[in-house]
Image (spheres, grey):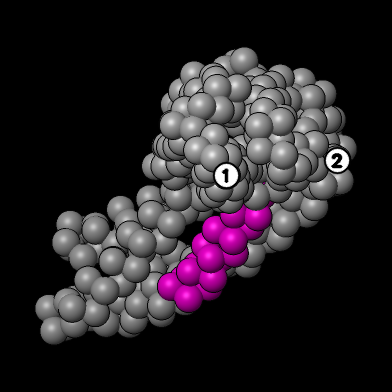
Amino acid sequence: MAVDTDDEFQKELIALFAQEAQEWLQQIHVALDELQQGPPADRHLKLAHTIKAGLANLGGSAATINLHDVEQASFSGLPLVEAVEDPSVPLSASAFLVLCKQLGQIHDALTRATGVAFDPESAAEEVVPVTVPAQEFLAALSDLISRLGCGTAMPCHVTKTIMAQVDGMVRSGVTHCDAASLREVLARGAEVEQAYAETVQRLGPLVADGIGMMAQTSIGQWKEVSGEWSAVANHASELWSVSQQVNAVDAMTFFTGLQSFLTIAMEQRVTLPASQFKKVETRLRAISSTIQEWAEAGRRERGAIEALLPAA
């Protein structure tokens, strides 16, 4: 009678464990799926810790009810997670697939021990990334630069940036690039460049108007409007800063010169003729359209790069 009671109690424990295992495995799969997307460093660490905690909980609970195969399969996954824990090293396709395979072994062990079908194949398929061979992708990007006929005015800045990132991954030992991660990089770049173009459209005319006012204001009145000149200088500084953030080299060069011009003018080191102010104002008003064209060229590049990637 006691034996039957023990058997029933063990069955109840296994049933409860199976429910907990489902939750832990769901958390592990979700975290692993996000990890292979190449998140920021702090998020990378948090996701790795989530996976380790899930495996440790799974193995520890299995040990308490003597499910030794599940315990061993779970704890065997910990070194695999620790191997990809460093956020400075991109998660390679091979390392990701090794982790997926280990999860499949855990699923098998759970199914044998609990009688609950955890369906490891479908779970693994949900998170297996679509990849592209890194070296082949580099060659395709190089060919794209030739086809686009990039020159000084439109230097294929997006393609060259992606090439530099992929080349860095190759040097780190990555053989395949995750297509979804590349699409995410392209999308983030598009958002940043659009925000940059909008900033130039907003601040450029303000600085140009200020320079126009400088040309019309006599030196004797400058002290009275020094606050306005300071605002103009601050806007020019912001234009340089946002240009640096998107690596718009030609714009950075122009805005560096603009800052120097405003410093000379405001400190009245030399008396500048009105024609000089007008020349700078005209150039500034023209650069807004140039940057808009630069951003539009970037959008065309991103479209061409996406066409090189395999379908999701």
Mark sitting on residue 310: 2
Residue 123 image point, x, y percent: 74, 42
Check the picture and name the quadrant holding the N terminus.
top right
Q: Secondary structure at mark 1?
A: helix
Q: Residue placed at 41% from the left, 61% from the top?
A: 239
Quadrant for residue 241, please give it: bottom left
Estimate the x, y position of residue 233 in percent, counting from the top left: 28, 66
Please, is residue 158 above or below residue 84 in the view? below
Q: Is residue 240 at all visible to an observer of this figure?
A: yes
Q: Which residues are magenta?
A: 185-204
Is 62 or 104 nearer to us in this picture? 62
- Name the mark nearer the viewer: 1 or 2: 1
Q: Is residue 291 magenta?
A: no
**Three-letter amino acid code of the residue under disc 1:** Glu
Q: Was residue 197 drawn as part of the magenta stretch in this picture?
A: yes
What residue would you read off at disc 1? Answer: 8
Of callouts 1 and 2, which one flags the residue occurring earlier in the amino acid sequence?
1
Q: Residue at x 64, y 64 (%)?
A: 292
> Is residue 219 shown left or right of residue 114?
left
Estimate how packed mark 1 is, as few (under 14), some (14 to 19) or many (20 or more) residues with alpha carbons within 10 Å.
few
- Asked whether, in this view, residue 188 is left or right of residue 93, the answer is left
Q: Nearer the viewer, residue 177 or 62?
A: 62
- Report the amino acid beneath label 2: Pro
Circle 2 SS class? loop
**Image quadrant assignment for residue 310:** top right
- Residue at x 47%, y 28% (from the top left corner): 63
